[in-house]
Image (cartoon, helix red, strand yellow):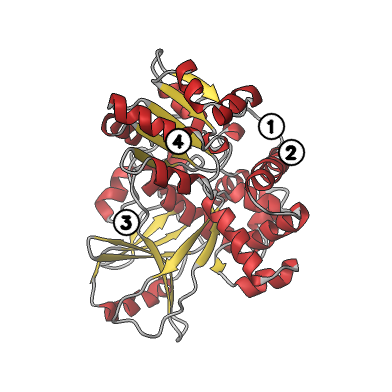
Amino acid sequence: MFINRHLEQVIQNANHAYAVLLLTGPRQVGKTTLLRTMAESDRTYVTLDNPVIRELAVTDPELFLQRYQPPLIIDEIQYAPQLLPYIKMYVDEHRRKGDFWLTGSQMFHLMKNVSESLAGRVAVIPIQGLSQAEISEGSTGAYQPDFDSLSDKLKTAKEMNVQEIFKRIHKGSMPALYETEQDIELFYSSYVNTYLQRDIRELTQVGDELAFLRFMTACAARTGQLLNYSELAKDVGISSPTAKQWLSMLLSSGIVILIEPYFNNALKRIVKSPRLYFMDTGLCAWLTRWTNPESLEVSAMSGAFFETYVVSEIYKSFLNAGKRPPLFYYRDTDGKEIDLMIEKNDVLYPIEVKKSGTPKADAIRHFKALEKTGKRMGTGNLICVSRELLPIDRQNLMVPVWLI
């Protein structure tokens, strides 16, 4: 079953404005399926996963473009960066919009080559796994924390209880898991093996795949926590510089994200380390060995997974709208902390996340700490597993998690 992706309109707009678009993100998030579904009948599809075609692209890029003429989809472009200068020459000669649709699963080398070869000619569009709004055919658009926007979402959002939420968290967001019923353990085991054996080994200098797997697991165990390279390195038995290099791979391939602390000149006593989050909670659960949603829901990590799910869903909502996610967190040296903040048009919208059906009103007590920033305060949200959208006070709302 194909699930309509909210990025379709962003891709259509880019297709009319740029000669080249690059859809990039982790493996198995639906890049190829989306582009092939959107493509018209005259657009040729070619994948560089095919070793024969890849050899032609690498050794004779000019002949490749004679053999496969635009409009064209080139899948896994990172395997033949030699093509990019020739695509540039073709684009400059023909000056047509939408000639090349490219996909790339890895970013560490790819983006350097793209920025050097196709600057000003390419729209780079990141994609992640399915959002809850896509799965439930809900409303599109970046997350809006105000009452009117959330009320509108009530018309299309599917209500979910805590068991359903954790089933979704444990399953993750890979489209293949929603197309056909399959063994989740086997899927993620195969996914990680492919990621390690193909992408990491072929495109980087990682010599010890087992150590890298332990590093991924250590990161998964810290989802929602402050990033500490020394602790990660110590747990895995590697150096801090290696930990930084390996984390950059996870970041550039879209496996994890970092949420930076909010800072302005009025804030002096803040914690400056970013927070680490996995983008796919199913992969995170597999790495940390939670074999079923029931165990995960009652575990010591349930709060971290719930927060990771909320952050990743809000993050994806901005990506799917073609926007850079304006997300931050707040924590000062006095221990005051706010899980997430949206900064939009110089207004701050604080968000607290609680895995509770009836969280106490003092859960948002630290929102007042933002008054010292000098910025205007927008509607605050307390995202939880309540069943209704309710006001906490004149400025803040209790938001059921299925509404994000």
From the viewer's perspective, is 134 left or right of 119?
right
Q: Earlier in the sequence, mark 3 or mark 2?
A: 3
Tell me which residue sits at (43%, 22%) in the image.
72
- Measure the alpha-carbon separation of dots 3 and 4: 41 Å
Check disc 2 and give the amino acid type. Answer: Leu
From the viewer's perspective, is 13 left or right of 127?
left
Nearer to us: label 3 or label 2 = 2
Mark 3 Cα-neighbour bin, 10 Å: few <14, some 14–19, many ≥20: many
Check disc 3 and give the amino acid type. Answer: Pro
Nearer to us: label 1 or label 2 = 2
- Measure the alpha-carbon separation of dots 2 and 4: 36 Å
Nearer to us: label 4 or label 1 = 4
- Measure the alpha-carbon separation of dots 3 and 1: 35 Å
Mark 2 Cα-neighbour bin, 10 Å: few <14, some 14–19, many ≥20: few
Q: Earlier in the sequence, mark 2 or mark 4?
A: 4
Q: Which mark is residue 182?
A: 1
- Measure the alpha-carbon separation of dots 1 and 2: 8 Å
Q: Earlier in the sequence, mark 3 or mark 1?
A: 3
Work out whether residue 302 can be spotted. Answer: no
Q: Secondary structure at mark 3?
A: loop
Q: Secondary structure at mark 4?
A: helix
Check disc 4 and give the amino acid type. Answer: Leu
Tell me which residue sits at (41%, 13%) in the image.
41
Q: Secondary structure at mark 1?
A: loop
Do labels 1 and 2 touch, CB within 8 Å?
A: yes
In the image, residue 20 lies at what x, y percent?
36, 33
Query: Which image quarter: residue 298?
Result: bottom right
Tell me which residue sits at (58%, 29%) in the image.
59
Residue topped by disc 4: 84
Residue topped by disc 2: 186
